[in-house]
Image (spheres, grey):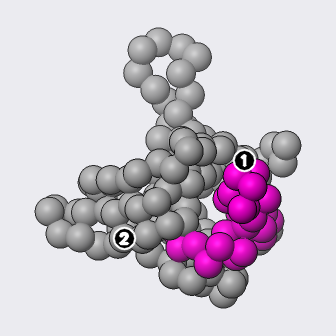
């Protein structure tokens, strides 16, 4: 799984002009699932994300986690995170998992995030054409990939 983590002061998602999810201070997570991903990847990522110290403490240093600040999470499916651009001008999405594989892992990711000590978990709609609005705080944007665990 490949995830873009954005620290936000607010974020919201709409589908066909209707609000389907919103958060205040917390993390916007753009989640891309590939064929090789497993429930173990979900477990590793959820723990890593909720404990990642990327919120500022009283001295302005990134020392606090999502749990520490009582932050919220907005989860958006994003197969384009697995775009391959090496050849030609049209991205290839061959590594992106098909819905039959991706949906159960996406739903597991949401469930595990809800089970973690997170104040609120909101989400978009898998496979929908979504409009996402956010105020990136910092800006802080981090890329994490369970297949590379760097």
The residue at the far right in this view is: 150
Regarding mark 1 in the picture, which secondary structure is present there? strand
Residue bearing the label numbered 2:
22
**Which quadrant of the view contains residue 26?**
bottom right
Furthest residue toward front: 59
- Position of residue 43 measured from the top left corner of the image (x, y, whole percent): 76, 71
Please provide the residue range marked out in magenta.
Answer: 44-73
Mark 1, Cα crowd under 10 Å, few <14 / some 14-19 / many 20+, is some
Hey, which residue is sitting farthest bottom in the picture?
115
Q: Is residue 99 left or right of residue 13?
A: right
Task: Of the two numbered discs 1 and 2 on the same chain, state the one appearing first in sequence.
Answer: 2
Which residue is found at the position 55% from the left and 61% from the top? 27
Residue 85 lies, with reference to residue 50, above or below; the image says: above
Q: Which residue is mark 1?
A: 145
Quarter of the figure with the C terminus: top right
Q: Is residue 118 left or right of residue 126?
A: right
Q: Quadrant of residue 109?
A: bottom right
The residue nearer to you, when weighing 69 against 150, is 69
In the picture, measured across the screen, residue 84 lies left or right of residue 9, that is right
Residue that appears at 47% across and 48% down: 136
Q: Where residue 25 appears, x then y in whole percent?
A: 50, 67
- The residue lying at 34 percent from left, 63 percent from top is 12
88 up-or-down from 109: above or below: above
Image mark for residue 16: none
Answer yes or no: is residue 63 visible.
yes
Q: Nearer the viewer, mark 1 or mark 2?
A: 2
Q: Residue at x 75, y 55 (%)?
A: 59
The location of residue 129, given as percent across then percent down, is 27, 54
């Amino acid at each position: 799984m490949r995830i873009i983590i954005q620290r936000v002061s607010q974020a919201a998602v709409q589908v066909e002009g209707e609000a389907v999810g919103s958060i205040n201070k917390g993390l916007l997570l753009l989640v891309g699932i590939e064929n090789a991903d497993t429930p173990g990847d979900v477990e590793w990522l959820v723990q890593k994300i909720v404990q990642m110290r990327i919120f500022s403490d009283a001295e302005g240093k990134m020392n606090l986690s999502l749990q520490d600040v009582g932050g919220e999470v907005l989860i958006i499916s994003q197969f384009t995170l697995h775009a391959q651009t090496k050849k030609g001008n049209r991205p290839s999405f061959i590594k992106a998992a098909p819905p039959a594989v991706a949906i159960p892992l996406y739903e597991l990711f949401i469930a595990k995030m809800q089970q973690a000590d997170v104040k609120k978990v909101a989400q978009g709609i898998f496979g929908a054409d979504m409009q996402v609005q956010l105020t990136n705080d910092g800006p802080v944007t981090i890329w994490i990939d369970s297949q590379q665990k760097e």
